[in-house]
Image (cartoon, rainbow, N blue to C red):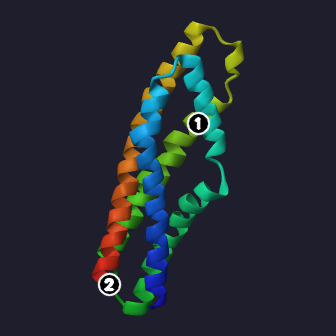
Amino acid sequence: MNMSNIFITAATVLSGLLAGLFYGYDCSVIKGLGKLPDREYLTAFQHINREIQNPYFFTSLMGTLILLPLAVWIYYKESGNYSAWLIAAVFFYWIGAFGITIVANVPLNNWIDGIKLENLDTEALHTIRVKFESNWNKWHHVRTYAAILSFCCSVLSLIKLK
């Protein structure tokens, strides 16, 4: 096994972990949270946002960001060719999964995290939830699909190497 295979495999595993996390969240957590009353929804979201900031998540998020383009470069250095699948994986990840996370979801997470929920009445809680929930979910769906596409392209690049 050469260096490019090692880096492509590592990037594929990390991108798969992230795609799986986003997919699992999309299939279950969003639906479960959606059934909660406003105060409980917002409180739960604050707790989840704080807990997701951990080494496991950051390894997948940042590791994929670094390893995918590094794998493209190493593969090119070893073979003199570019892998279209690997370049597509980088594109889907950087723009769709990571880019949307940083530009859309993180600012919404930070906004929600800064709100003192205990000081708000029922109407204010509902207004905040309506403003947050549909926007956050929309961008989460997009980044989920992008992460899955990135993972699939990474897998296809490995298949093509054989």
Residue at 41% from the left image edge and 41% from the top image edge: 26
Question: Is 127 situated above or below 94?
Answer: above
| Viewer-nearest residue: 83 or 148 | 148
Q: Quadrant of the C terminus?
A: bottom left
Question: Residue 111's spot in the image, x, y percent?
Answer: 62, 31
Question: Residue 100's spot in the image, x, y percent?
Answer: 46, 47
Q: Which quadrant of the structure image shows residue 5?
A: bottom left
| Viewer-nearest residue: 143 or 29 | 29
Q: Quadrant of the N terminus?
A: bottom left
In this rendering, position of residue 1 left or right of residue 161: right
Q: Which mark is residue 161?
A: 2
| Viewer-nearest residue: 114 or 11 | 11
- Please report whichever mark, 1 or 2, sits nearer to the chain's N-terminal start: 1
Mark 2 closeness class: few <14, some 14–19, many ≥20 residues within 10 Å: few
Amino acid marked by disc 2: Leu
Residue 1 shows up from this direction = yes
As measured in the structure, the alpha-carbon distance from the residue carrying label 1 to the one carrying label 2 is: 39 Å
Question: Residue 127's spot in the image, x, y percent?
Answer: 52, 15
| Viewer-nearest residue: 17 or 90 | 17
Residue 111 shows up from this direction = no
Residue at 45% from the left image edge and 48% from the top image edge: 22
Tag in front: 1 or 2: 2
In this rendering, position of residue 116 left or right of residue 72: right
**Secondary structure of residue under mark 2:** helix
Q: Which quadrant of the structure image shows residue 116?
A: top right
Amino acid marked by disc 1: Asn
Mark 1 closeness class: few <14, some 14–19, many ≥20 residues within 10 Å: some
Residue annotated with mark 1: 109
Question: Residue 101's spot in the image, x, y percent?
Answer: 50, 47
